[in-house]
Amino acid sequence: MAGMIAGKVVVVTGAGGGIGRDIALALAAEGARVVVNDIGTSTTGEGQDTGPAQSVVNEIRAAGGEAVANNDSVADAAPAARIVQCALDHFGRVDGVVNNAGILRDRFFHKMSLDEWDAVIKVHLYGSYYVSRAAANHFKEQGSGVFVHMTSTSGLIGNLGQANYSAAKLGLVALSKSIALDMQKFGVRSNCIAPFAWSRMSGSIPTDTPEQQARVEKIKQMTPNKIAPLAVYLLSDGAADVNAQVFAVRNNEIFLMSQPRPLRSVHRGEGWTPQNIADHGMPALKASFVPLDRSADVFSWDPV
């Protein structure tokens, strides 16, 4: 693994803590030069603090690596573009982007406010678009570049009380696929990782019952540094033939996730009426219905 990423310049958003921090540290340990972006907000997006990003930069430099801190927000186009410009200003190029920045404003759908919807969509989906778009022309001109986007099983499968987060994270999968399709001819790749890890954002999970407490203890086993090796690999030239895929990482497990494809079909030569659909079409399709499950129902075993 040593040297797979040496000399490359990678932007990591939301890298002041948690998963982003561990990816930034792992990239630097493998020889990458890293832009450590973090606005330093709370998990819900309030406040600002330059400390977390600079702390990670200090840690990288103390270990002999190269890094620079950036405190611009991903949630608006101009500051997001400055994050990529920071890489160009300090290191002269940009080779990879890890779209990791995120906030949570969990609420059951019938109680969710417009602000709670907007804030989460702006950071996760708009933010990933803005940073990716700012890097895209540089990638095109140099004939290479890699995007790694953090999605979530909340979007891929489903979760309670996260309509804003789930919608953004599934939208990010479609964005990644579109980037991969549009930019493959320029040597640009785009993949997603759905991480399972205990971080600040996981701290909002309720622990009111013994069952909830047990679930949180299991999640705490899944440390953020377990995500970093796959991110580093995807950003390396060793992953040159890996494009438009969605992976999940859960402690020591790596999963390749499915993407929507037809499951079953029905055909009626003379066409369909609402009554025909009720009598024939829907009963034939029901055997392949996707159950109304959540991420925890699908990943029901303890982390390995």
Image (cartoon, rainbow, N blue to C red):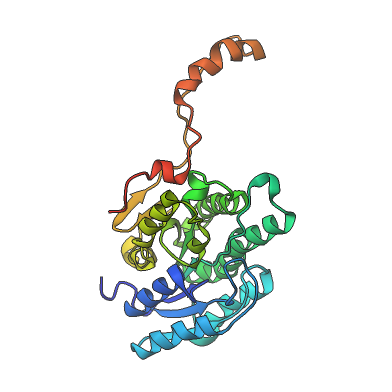
Looking at this rendering, what residue extends furthest in the left direction? 1
Determine which quarter of the picture holds residue 197: bottom left
**Which image quadrant: the C terminus?**
bottom left
Q: Residue 199: horizontal and vertical position, in percent?
A: 45, 66
Query: In the image, is residue 157 above or below residue 284?
Result: below
Name the side, left or right, on which 248 lies relative to 35. Answer: left
Q: Residue 227: horizontal and vertical position, in percent?
A: 37, 63
User: Foreground: 20 or 201?
Assistant: 201
Query: In the image, is residue 187 above or below residue 80?
Result: above
Name the side, left or right, on which 299 lies relative to 16. Answer: left
Q: Residue 130: horizontal and vertical position, in percent?
A: 62, 66
Query: In the image, is residue 247 above or below residue 148?
Result: above
Name the side, left or right, on which 202 lies relative to 248. Answer: right
Residue at image position (42%, 55%) is 213
Residue at image position (50%, 66%) is 100
**Which image quadrant: the N terminus?**
bottom left
User: Foreground: 243 or 29?
Assistant: 29
**Number of labelled discs?**
0
Residue at image position (65%, 76%) is 47
Q: Residue 89: horizontal and vertical position, in percent?
A: 55, 85
Residue 245 showing in the rendered view: no
Looking at this rendering, what residue extends furthest in the right direction? 114
Residue 270 showing in the rendered view: yes
